Amino acid sequence: MHRRIQSLLTQDFGKKIQLLSGPRQVGKTTLSQQVAVDYQYLNYDRAEHRQLIKEAAWDRKQKLIIFDELHKMPQWKQWLKGIYDTEKNGPSLFVTGSARLDTYRKVGDSLAGRYFQYRLNPLTLNELKIAEDGFQPKKSFFRLMNCSGFPEPYLDSTSNFYQRWRATHLDIILRQDLVDLETVSSIQGIEQLIYLLSQQVGSTISYSSLARSLQVSDKTIKRWLGILESLFVLFRVTPYAHKQSQVISKAPKFYFYDIARVDGNEGARFENLVGLALQSELDFMKDTLGKDLTLQFLRKKDGREIDFVVADRAKVRALIECKWSDGARSPNFALAQEIIPQNVRMLQLVAELGQEKTFADGCEIRSAPEWLSLLDGATIF
């Protein structure tokens, strides 16, 4: 399946080191091998490849060297910098990893100015519209809801396959990626934390409540959540406040990269699907255009809430509400007039909608499958 970011990777090939991160089994290796015909693939998890990496003994006749899971190598950035700086005429370097490679956030990083950063997330409707023959928004929408956007279960499209895939996918993350970071007892606790969070999607989380349930400290819960974010199991959405005095609580919400893992509540799963689509679009804009927008939510003391706020440092770009089948305008959009001192785009996305609507103040009620399939952040935000 052609991925949306593939043309950019090809366009940037050979200019700098290319760093591609994303969840396990999202298609990073397959995508990296489509950048060039002549390549050598080296996975740091494999002993024979690890030795070749340590000896810097790869085939320099190849146009591309792909290093997978290189972040597990001690001092990998300094090592990679040395290769890049001393072998200007050597093969192009491509690094993939199932943990965040957030080097660009660190001042004075050894790779500064030497790389382009990319993220590959699970499939979303706007990507499927381009990649899928005979694309049907509603059909693909419900397949994402039931099988997630990870390519293997999505393409199989059966619930039975997804359930089996989900068990092995989480087991790989817990038993391979966490084994060097946590004790066995901690891994069991993290597994239980994932289960508890799958039932709380769309709600702000309480560190103390989770700590009591798992019989650990608040500090431990925060550390575990940070690990799950770094391994692309979860992504965090924080509360928005135009002024610091408006912050009611610093408690965030957490959403899953694996949409179908959200248990029981189809409304919560739908909100997760929308959240992932928006976050993926913002990641794409950051990686391809350099635009730094954030995904947040808006909440007041009286409990009124806007599900998603897209903003940058200067202004709010959009307010987005998610409803499963309610075509009536959400009263929560009144929050915009109370808190945000500017006109913003107001969108209510409905999973099952009979009639789309627009209002005099610009508020829109749109079919979620249709709108998300046309999502283009560069023009919308």
Image: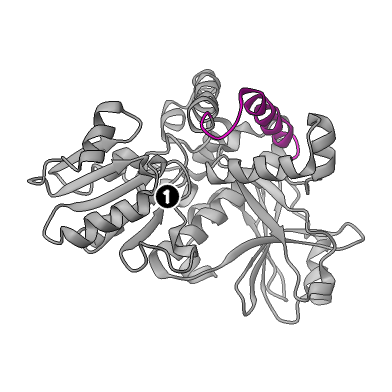
Q: Is residue 219 visible?
A: yes
Q: Is residue 324 visible?
A: no
Tell me residue 231's x, y (percent). 52, 41
Placement of 133 over or under 246, stated as above or below: above
Tell me residue 80's x, y (percent). 29, 53
Placement of 301 over or under 230, stated as above or below: below
Q: Give the residue number, with chain letter if any, for mark 1.
A: 127
Compared across the picture, whether 339 is left or right of 130 comes to right
Compared across the picture, whether 239 is left or right of 270 comes to right
| Residue 191 drawn in magenta | yes
The range drawn in magenta is: 179-200
Q: Secondary structure at mark 1?
A: helix
Name the kind of residue labelled 1 in the image. Glu
Residue at x 72% of width, y 76% of height? 361
Residue at x 79% of width, y 43% of height? 218
> 228 or 262, which is in the foreground?
228
Packing grade of label 1 (10 A; few <14, some 14-19, many >=20) is: many
Tell me residue 199's x, y (percent). 74, 34
Quarter of the image for residue 16 reads: bottom left
The quadrant of the rendering that contains the C terminus is bottom right
**Magenta span dominant secondary structure:** helix
> 170 or 208, which is in the foreground?
208
